[in-house]
């Protein structure tokens, strides 16, 4: 197969886990009904808000949310990237920010824990210290699927091109960026960075983002999108809880890599 239909799910999640998971399941089902065989959810899709609430909502893998996503993938016969959830860690009061990949039979195919933690203070825009509550992951995760190889990242990872180049070295054809990208920086940086990572690594970038205000002080940018290896935005989600779908043409990907073989022109691995 040289083409598939992919979908990104955009949510406005809250601290109410059951509501969030139901909304995710509804939109994933709609995407599958519209023909998508690969569907991706955003970061912390089952609970986002105050960090204390996110930590309190943390689950083991496998837990209720991952089990439901496994069943959803199997019932719909799709490959499902379960954005990320708060995973219980071995350290009291801290979690992992964990993205799970499920195959069409419901089997868990991959587990990626966010490597780069969002500790920033941009005046009048955003102040967050993710490392106070989250443990960083260590592994770089690429998974070979029947139609393509998927590389995984989460949100702030987008600002670190070394991770994306490592995924390109693992022959990633598609790189997922589930996110809750802050509104204050998203307006200027979200699309630019997504397109840059796609162009640099000659890969499709699938970026489901949270949208809207989660708490009085926490707002996500939205504009979930799918970008092709030439840097062309194929689809962008409307504001609010919504879907964006686009065809991934892997023959086009191979043509781009053949006609502009930048990855093979690197010197000394750089």
Image (cartoon, rainbow, N blue to C red):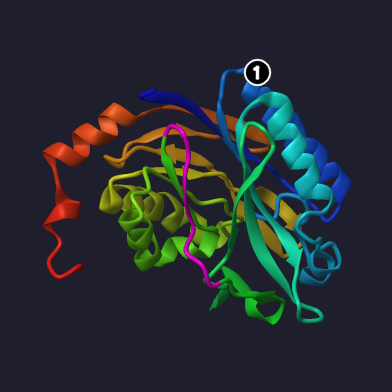
Span shown in magenta? 138-147
Spot occupied by residue 195 in the image (x, y as percentages of width and height): 35, 48
Label 1 sits on residue: 33
Q: Quadrant of the N terminus?
A: top left
Q: Quadrant of the C terminus?
A: bottom left
Which residue is located at x 15 percent, y 53 percent? 264
Which residue is located at x 83 percent, y 56 percent? 15
Examine the structure image and report whether residue 146 is included in the region drawn in magenta.
yes
Which residue is located at x 79 percent, y 64 percent? 54
Position above or below: 45 against 24: below
Spot occupied by residue 166 in the image (x, y as percentages of width and height): 35, 62
Position above or below: 166 against 206: below
Q: Is residue 49 left or right of residue 143?
A: right
Which residue is located at x 81 percent, y 63 percent? 58
Spot occupied by residue 106 in the image (x, y as percentages of width and height): 69, 37
Element on which disc 1 rests: helix
């Amino acid at each position: 197969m040289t083409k598939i239909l992919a979908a990104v799910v955009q949510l406005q999640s809250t601290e109410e886990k059951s509501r969030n998971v139901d909304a995710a399941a509804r939109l994933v089902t709609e995407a599958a009904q519209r023909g998508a065989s690969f569907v991706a959810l955003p970061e912390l899709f089952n609970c986002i808000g105050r960090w204390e609430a996110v930590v309190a909502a943390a689950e083991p893998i496998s837990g209720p949310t991952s089990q439901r996503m496994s069943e959803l993938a199997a019932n719909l016969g799709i490959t499902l990237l379960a954005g990320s959830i708060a995973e219980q860690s071995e350290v009291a009061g801290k979690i992992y920010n964990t993205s799970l990949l499920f195959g069409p039979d419901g089997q868990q195919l991959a587990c990626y824990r966010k490597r780069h933690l969002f500790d920033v203070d941009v005046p009048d825009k955003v102040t967050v210290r993710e490392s106070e509550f989250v443990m960083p992951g260590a592994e770089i995760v690429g998974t070979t699927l029947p139609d393509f190889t998927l590389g995984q990242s989460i949100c702030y990872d987008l600002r670190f091109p070394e991770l994306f180049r490592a995924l390109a070295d693992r022959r990633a054809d598609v790189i997922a960026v589930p996110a809750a990208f802050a509104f204050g920086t998203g307006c200027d940086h979200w699309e630019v960075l997504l397109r840059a990572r796609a162009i640099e690594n000659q890969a499709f970038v699938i970026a489901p983002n949270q949208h809207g205000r989660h708490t009085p002080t926490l707002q996500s940018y939205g504009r979930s999108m799918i970008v092709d290896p030439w840097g062309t935005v194929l689809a962008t989600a409307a504001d609010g809880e919504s879907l964006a779908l686009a065809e991934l043409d892997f023959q086009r990907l191979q043509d781009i890599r053949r006609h502009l073989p930048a990855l093979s022109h690197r010197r000394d691995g750089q």
